[in-house]
Structure formats: structure tokens, C-alpha cells
Image (tube, coloured by chain):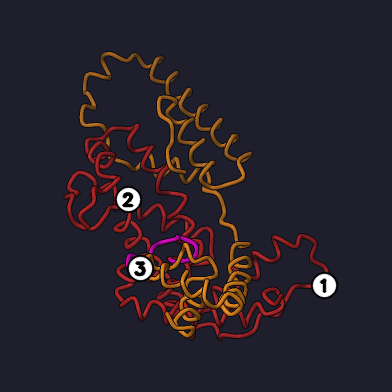
Chain colours: A red, B orange
Amino acid sequence: MGQTDPDEELLARVGAGDPAAVRALVARKLPRLLALAQRMLGDAAEAEDVAQETFVRAWRQAAAWKPGGARFDTWMHRVALNLCYDRLRRRREIATDQPPEQRDEGPGPDRGLQAADTGRRVGRALQALPDRQREAIVLCHYQELGNIEAAGLMGVSVEALEGLLGRGRRALRLALADMVEP
Amino acid sequence: MTEERFKVLAEAYGGDISRWPPDEREAAAALMAAKPAFTQDVLVEAGLLDAVLDDWTRQPAPAALVARIVAGAPAPRRASRWRGWLMPAGLSAGLAAAGVAGLLAGVQLSEQAAEGGDAVALVVAALDPTIVAEEV
């Protein structure tokens, strides 16, 4: 990377058991990691479990963290994503198949809050995407990672990432057509 | 940059070119100057989907989750075995109660906060008033 890891100093203090550093690291990382898990899994309780387990591993890693390799933030994203994938795999083993890519049924006639309803529909449409497409969109659109970092996290080329993003967004446009059309 | 490449980028990264790969932005800007009508249409179409996606807001981090995570962190190295001698039981209980009160204050505050980051910052601040939570 060639750049200093912005978490390096904080991490060293966490490794030394500094309670203030622990709390600062939680404040810095938890919101984004929880959001990542919520969007990957679509389940609040499971997302909390993933966030907590990610921190359990981070605490173990803190004292032994060696600067110069991957950034700590990237490492935490990787851990959280792997945990999400474990859970998604387990779900597939229990249920039989992936949810079909189908057009969303649209808003119900008696729902009141437009924004909340929109959010729920977007959430459902994202959950209906194939996992890799959803991951690409979550990393690039919601987590706002750069293309190189996102592709690195997913273990794919930038071209493959762009393909996943394009297919995912086209599927979303189709599923949410009534909301997206001008 | 070709029109085709411009479209691929918009379909992948959305309608805001500041979120496109940095090494493609200059060429994209040049195409926008040369073909304003085409590029505008492409960006607006991608931007409409961006706006819909942004309606899916995240849930804030519950105070109890923050407390669980903090509780699992490495213990201070200088955790002293003399603490039992130096800290009478009454004082220990008092400090524990103060900690719980602080956490509850954080929970209450976090419930008033609109965003997850704010909630975490408030709970963390309640857990330790000596620090200011950052980057949330």
C-alpha cells in the first residue's frame, strides 16, 4: 500500500489493553461493519452477531498486528464478509435454493410511510440478488470502497467487479422499475 | 473514452463520477464536454437508481451490542492484583453502579440519535467520558 495505516496507532494501544483506545476503535469501526452485515444478510440479529464476532477476532489480532500489509480496516471488512458468507452458505444448506431473481411485488396499497416502504423494498430487492452481485454493490455503493479495494476484498479483477456491479444494478433497476423510472 | 465505456462505468459505479475509478474521471469529463446530451442522459438514469438505493438506511448500533463488544476487548495489562486490597467492596460496587448508570445514559442518548454512528459515539462517550469518539 505504501501509506500509513490510519488505525495503526490506535491498534497498538488496543493491543496494550488501553480501554479508551478500545472504545475509540469500536466507535470508528462498528457503524460501517454493522451496516455491511445488515446489507449482506438482511437480518438485524445475525448482523449483530457478525459484528460482534468480527471484533472478537480483532481483539485477538490487535497485539500481534504487523503494519505494512493489508490495512486493518480492509482486514476487518474481509473478516466480516467471510462471516456473512458462512451464514449465507448455511442458509442455502437449510433452504434449498437461492431466492429467485424476480420482480418486486411493489408497495402495498395500505402502507403509510413512503420512505420506510422504499427502504424495505430496496432491502428485499438486494437480498434477492446473487450473493456476489449484492456484495459488489454493498462494497462499492454503500461502503463507498474504491474499485481496487473492493475487487481485492472479493478476490476478483476490477473488470469482473464492474461486471458484477453492472448486472446487479440492472437487476435492481428491473426489480424496482416503478421507483427508478423518471 | 468511448460512449460505450462511459455507459459501462455509469452502470457499474452510478451517476456520480466522483465515485468512478480515479484514473477514468478525466477522460469521462472530456466526454461530458464533448457529448453533453448523451452523457447527461446516462448519468441521470444511473443517478435515479442511486437515489432509490440510498433510501435503504442502516439501523443504528444498539447500545447493548456496543457494551458486549467493549466487554470482550483485551484487558489492561496493568490489571493489578492489588486492586482487591486498594479498593474496598463498597467502592467497587459504587464504581460498578456508576458504570451501569453511564451505559444506561448512553442507551437513552443513543435512542435519540438518528444515525448508527451517532449512537455508537454516544454510548462510547457514556462508557468513557475522557474520550471523544471519532469518525462516526
Mark 1 neighbour density, 10 Å: few (under 14) some (14–19) many (20 or more): few
**Mark 1 belongs to which amino acid?**
Pro
State which quarter of the image contains the C terminus of chain A: bottom right
Which of the 4 image quadrants contains residue A149?
bottom left
**In the rendered image of this protein, does residue A139 appear above or below residue A29?**
below
Q: Is residue B79 highlighted in magenta?
A: no
- C-alpha distance separating marks 1 and 2: 44 Å
Earlier-in-chain disc, 1 versus 2: 2
Give the residue furthest to the front: B34
- Which residue is disc 2 drawn over? A56
Q: Which residue is drawn at 47% across and 46% down?
A: B65
**Mark 3 belongs to which amino acid?**
Asp
- Which residue is disc 3 drawn over? B23
Residue B92: where, in percent of width, then height?
38, 19
Q: Residue at x 42, y 38 (%)?
A: B134
Residue B59: where, in percent of width, then height?
57, 54
Badge 1 marks a residue whose secondary structure is loop
- Mark identifier at residue A109: 1
Residue A34: where, in percent of width, then height?
46, 55
Whether residue A44 appears in this view of the structure is yes
Task: Please indicate whether residue B42 sits to the left or right of residue A80 in the image.
Answer: right
Along the line of sight, the residue nearer the viewer: A41 or A31? A31
Which label lies toward us, 2 or 3? 3
The magenta region covers A140-149
Q: Which residue is drawn at 37% across and 17% down?
A: B89
**Mark 2 belongs to which amino acid?**
Val
Which of the 4 image quadrants contains residue A158?
bottom left
Whether residue A94 appears in this view of the structure is no
- C-alpha distance separating marks 1 and 3: 46 Å
Marks 2 and 3 on same chain: no
Which label lies toward us, 1 or 2? 1
Q: Of helix, strand and loop, which mostly describes the magenta segment? A: helix
